[in-house]
Amino acid sequence: MAKQLDYHTIREIFDRFHYAEPEPKGELEHVNVYTLVVAVALSAQATDAGVNKATRALFKIADTPQKMLDLGLDGLTEHIKTIGLFRQKAKNVIRMSQILVDQFDGEVPNSRAALQSLPGVGRKTANVVLNMWWQQPAQAVDTHIFRIGNRTGICPGKDVDAVERAIEDHIPADYQLHAHHWLILHGRYVCVARKPKCAACLIRDLCMFEDKNL
């Protein structure tokens, strides 16, 4: 675990991220907040590209909780069978949709607690939805952010909760909204797990990683 970077270094890092990509976007395709929740829930232990491939046809016919219930478990399972853990995920999506219809009038709630009460929705999923749809500075810590946080010193922590707190505590407020997207994209395409692309990294001179590939 790298040592926590100081304020000025972190601000310079995010100045560079912002300059390179002022408005970073999540890569999961969706048409409304309900399909965003479903897509994020399906993305656990799966790639965004794989989820998008499976949901393009699905969301054309089931873009509301009631339409998903009308499609049914078997119909949903057929659409998402290429995604890892698809059987359990299909059951969660159907249960989630039923709860949304019965308890929330078919609308997706916008508090973290209410979101986390839905089957298949953990803190990370709730944070993604709060951030991407309602523009809240919620930090969804995935494996990429956990790796980068500890590798670079931007937001080190022994577990995902500690890394989430480090982001909230140390990244300047004006960069909080997009922080997790900048970090995820950097981890997905540059600071990869094996053989990080340090020579192409725009923060390589500020990073605390000792084994840089230069």
Image (cartoon, helix red, strand yellow):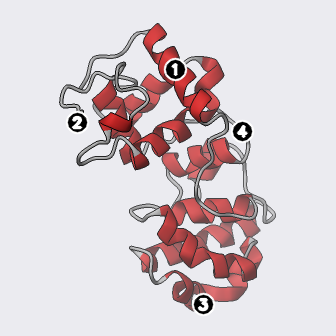
Whether tag 4 and tag 1 are in contact, CB under 8 A, the answer is no
Label annotation for residue 213: 2
Q: Amino acid at mark 3?
A: Gly
Q: Is residue 2 left or right of residue 58?
A: left
Whether tag 3 and tag 4 are in contact, CB under 8 A, the answer is no
Q: Amino acid at mark 4?
A: Gln
Q: Is residue 67 left or right of residue 87?
A: right
Tell me the distance, in whole angstroms, between the alpha carbons under discs 3 and 2.
47 Å
Q: Residue at x 36, y 19 (%)?
A: 206
Q: Residue at x 52, y 85 (%)?
A: 77
Tell me the distance, in whole angstroms, between the alpha carbons under discs 1 and 2.
26 Å
Residue 119 sits in which quadrant? bottom right
- In the rendered image, residue 197, in percent from the top left (x then y), is placed at 32, 41
- Location of mark 1 (residue): 171
Tell me the distance, in whole angstroms, between the alpha carbons under discs 1 and 3.
44 Å
Q: Residues within 10 Å of mark 4 (few under 14, many from 20)?
A: few
Q: Residues within 10 Å of mark 2 (few under 14, many from 20)?
A: few
Q: Residue at x 42, y 65 (%)?
A: 46
Q: Nearer the viewer, mark 3 or mark 2?
A: 2
- Location of mark 3 (residue): 75
Element type at marker 1?
loop
- In the rendered image, residue 193, in percent from the top left (x then y), is placed at 28, 47
- Location of mark 4 (residue): 135
Q: Amino acid at mark 2?
A: Asn
The numbered mark, 1 or 2, whose residue comes first in the sequence reads 1
The numbered mark, 1 or 3, whose residue comes first in the sequence reads 3
